[in-house]
Image (tube, coloured by chain):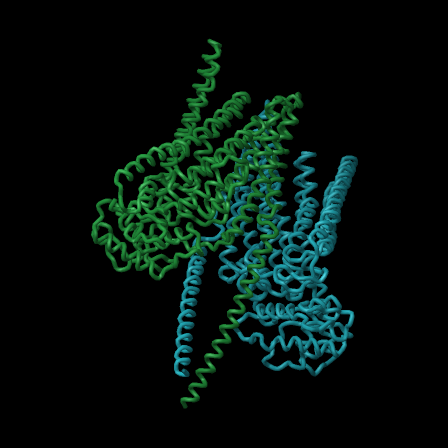
Chain colours: A cyan, B green
Amino acid sequence: MKVTLSALDTCESSFTPLVVLELAQDVKEETKEWLKNRIISKKEDGDDNDDFLTMAECQFIIKHELENLRARDEKMIPGYPQAKLYPGKSLLRRLLTSGIVIQVFPLHDNEALKKLEDTWYTRFTLKYQPIDHIRGYFGETIALYFGFLEYFTVALIPMAVIGLPYYLFVWEDYDKYVIFASFNLIWSTVILEVWKRGCANMTYRWGTLVMKRQFEEPRPGFHGVLGINPVTGRKEPLYPSYKRQLRIYLVSLPFVCLCLYFSLYVMMIYFDMEAWALSLHEKSGSEWTSVLLYVPSIIYAIVIEIMNRLYRYAAEFLTSWENHRLESAYQNHLILKVLVFNFLNCFASLFYIAFVLRDMKLLRQSLATLLITSQILNQIMESLLPYWLQRKHHVQVKRKVQALKADIDATLYEQVVLEKEMGTYLGTFDDYLELFLQFGYVSLFSCVYPLAAAFAVLNNFTEVNSDALKMCRVLKRPFSEPSANIGVWQLAFETMSVISVVTNCALIGMSPQVNALFPESKLDLVLIVVAVEHALLAFKFILAFAIPDKPRHIQMKLARLEFESLEALKQQQMKLMAENLKEESREGRKEEEEA
Amino acid sequence: MKVTLSALDTCESSFTPLVVLELAQDVKEETKEWLKNRIISKKEDGDDNDDFLTMAECQFIIKHELENLRARDEKMIPGYPQAKLYPGKSLLRRLLTSGIVIQVFPLHDNEALKKLEDTWYTRFTLKYQPIDHIRGYFGETIALYFGFLEYFTVALIPMAVIGLPYYLFVWEDYDKYVIFASFNLIWSTVILEVWKRGCANMTYRWGTLVMKRQFEEPRPGFHGVLGINPVTGRKEPLYPSYKRQLRIYLVSLPFVCLCLYFSLYVMMIYFDMEAWALSLHEKSGSEWTSVLLYVPSIIYAIVIEIMNRLYRYAAEFLTSWENHRLESAYQNHLILKVLVFNFLNCFASLFYIAFVLRDMKLLRQSLATLLITSQILNQIMESLLPYWLQRKHHVQVKRKVQALKADIDATLYEQVVLEKEMGTYLGTFDDYLELFLQFGYVSLFSCVYPLAAAFAVLNNFTEVNSDALKMCRVLKRPFSEPSANIGVWQLAFETMSVISVVTNCALIGMSPQVNALFPESKLDLVLIVVAVEHALLAFKFILAFAIPDKPRHIQMKLARLEFESLEALKQQQMKLMAENLKEESREGRKEEEEA
């Protein structure tokens, strides 16, 4: 209660609460006073809070300002002698690591949120998402994720539509499969290239396409011996690169390898279970045991999910321990670690079934079980369960607030108490990862299980809604973050589509229908398959190279922008020169007069 | 004689002649007068010719100034009513296309040239080239070519050294070949990546690494209906994109395909000749006919060179006729056309021998003959023959000048007359192309003919010298041109090294030694080879991704530069704001005084 009072004190009618800074319960008065003064003194020469900026932008600016509150001559945080400071150290960082500030988060704007929800997901109609509104409320990074999710879903529809008859009419002719697989390979290349153009279109509209790379400050958790940064000449912690390399190669790499080995070990247990279930089914042959056949796959899918989540924590801990100076380096190392493990963990069993066991029936069954189970699990774990918990909590808070019968404005108090208990959105990483793995399920073995695309489309239609629910009602509002594209995920999806060319060619080469065409010489078959694969890969690269990353009209506009800024620069310099001349002549005249 | 008089008139002691503008013999007086006035009026508000800039930089500036002399209110070139002008049209362009100006070229600086030659190529010692001096004299683009040539030669030495014993001791064990080929593949990837770093190092030193892309003006030969450029809003010729596309797809593409077909047809004739020579040799069996065995290859190598050169002219004509607006687009289309044809023309017969005939002995023999013949031909055609012709001409000119016994300064007159007859350097295109094809000979079939690298190294040692001779003594001095890297050639070399992974794996898979290891199942062999090939390709891509394109210290310096420019910008804006405030307060006080 005490926590929110300072905000409520200043609550006039014109005041819109934007960001909450939650302090620990037992913070000393002097610390609070000092912190308030530092924030206010920064704020005074700051911006006006007018309608020119969206609420998300205001919150982004406040976050940036708070993070750049830096120690001047303070040696420690007043009241906390153990919380040391040095000139230039971010105050917020130290307050957070000392446990004085518990969290900083932006508040929801209930009115705008209601409006957004109405156009977004509450009515189940088939229409595009209000991406621009999402961007206005949550910022570019999250809007781009929803844009990509929607684009990807729509792009999968042709594959799903073409794949359906294969399932319905049980087409087993090899030539039809070849056509389907070839279509898939070309299609996946095209959609990834076209996305770049669509993305450029969107971010041009938002003004973040030609975002100047900001000068990157050290990331929050970075620590080291205080020294002079060779680039900025400022005091900041330094950490020798060789120590980081040692940590990466002597600890992280072996650990990742161990995890990969463990994942393969679990996979072998799954195959043992599978064999046991099959033998049981063959012995008894009842209907009850035929259901049992699916049980190992389902258990394995659940175990995979659990392992992925556990590994995620370990990877975060390790990457954080590697002590990267920049947030971007941290992210790259984390993404690499997680991608490699998740790829192996999810797809190793399928590769094993496809290329070692060569059992296409089992492959189809495993693929279907893994895909569907992981999708259902994800939807439940990610949105529905937290939403249910959240609703329960909501009711409790309401009851408490009504019991208090506070004479202060209870709405804001209630909102802050509610939102501070909500989960924190940890960035788009997990959402993209889910799509990435789904893309793998759909494209790696597309010629064996053409129905995968249809399931993916179905899942994504609900995914859009459950993700929207998650963002609007389950999690704390995240700080908005500008971005120009989906970054490293573009590369990850493209790599997956290259790998899928290889797997699909191999699968087609192994199919009995194709093998029947070459009854005498398997060698010719393999050579033809390899030749086709190389041709497809070459075609993919040429296609990716030939499709421009930005649509022509965006290129033109950018060129125009560049030209105009060059012209403006020229004119500004001319004006400056003219003014200097005028100034000089005026000084000259004055001197003459004085003389 | 009349031609150079206007320059000689103004020839004072402090005057250094930089650029020659050669007019046609019968140009009218009024045109000359007008042109002189236009050039001088431009020059007056131009730069001082002091020691701050190198001579090459001064010449570059003069070229830029001349090319940007644009028509104002002139409707035609005075004296030439048929040479139409419109506002903004480049005068030099119209003068050149109307045949009034024959050429513009920079003069050599004999003193500096002598110095450069002494440290460069006149003494045959093993040492690095004076790249920085070359850059000072010829500009960055040419210095980068010589830098690349030298780097590439040095980088080939390990391959040549490892390849030699294979030839000397006739090692035919498959495992040694596999090791050699693997080394080659990794090595070629590494050297291309390391070059990027070396290149960044050099261009950072020269200040061209972070060259701002200039706003590109339409290229000289571009023509079209006069209209408004949508980007700049200026009047300039416009040419609809669809017309260009039609020309490309309906004329250029079929023509290129026809040429490719013709090249393959010539190849088949070569194989007929080869068979005929072999049958002749087998019939008679004399030593004379064993020499005859090499004749078809030599003839074919010469024919290939001739076809390459003829095709080059056709490609230039076609690309020019496609009427690209930008020089960069023109260059890209030209390079693509020429690369595809040259690749097929040079390597088709080798591919045919390797993978259709599967005759490794013939492959080795053809490869050696093609490589050595093309290298010898190139050296003769490119430098020695023109040098010899040039020397002959030089003697004639000297005799003429002495016969004149002119009382004017004969040295400059002689120099201009000599240099204006020299050939024009057409850019680094042909030089890079030669290296590119050499790289193909060395890497595509390296496991069959490990001696290729040694020949390439030998050739390049002399190539450095003959190219240097060509630049200094045979050709007109080219205008210097800044550049940040070797551009599209980096991509071309990387593509070649990817293709060579495929060919080498296939060759090793076909070798009898490897085949002997799998006596029962050819299928297993092919599968293993394909797996190894994929692993190598994946490794290559990861390696290329993992090696940073810029060395760490350059990255740091660039970051520092960016940081400092941002800081300077901030301070400049602060100062500007302060001055505006001061100005306002002064005006305010004045008004008060007046009131």
Residue B560: x and y, percent? Answer: 58, 59
**Relative to B381, is B534 on the left or the right?**
right
**Relative to B279, is A407 on the left or the right?**
right
Return the residue nearer the eye: A508 or B356: B356
Return the residue nearer the eye: B157 or A164: B157
| Total numbered circles | 0
Residue B140: x and y, percent? Answer: 47, 47
Q: Is residue A512 above or below residue A457?
A: above
Q: Residue at x 50, y 31 (%)?
A: B459
**Relative to B345, is B401 on the left or the right?**
left
Q: Residue at x 54, y 75 (%)?
A: A50
Residue B487: x and y, percent? Answer: 48, 45
Return the residue nearer the eye: B219 or B42: B42
Residue B358: which quarter of the image? top right
Determine the residue located farthest toward the bottom in the rendered image: B595
Q: Is residue A554 above or below residue B185?
A: below
Q: Is residue A235 above or below residue B303?
A: below
Q: Is residue B49 visible?
A: yes
Residue B537: x and y, percent? Answer: 60, 38
Picture quarter with the C terminus of chain A: bottom left
Q: Is residue B592 above or below residue A362?
A: below
Picture quarter with the N terminus of chain A: bottom right
Return the residue nearer the eye: B426 or A208: B426
Q: Is residue B254 visible?
A: no
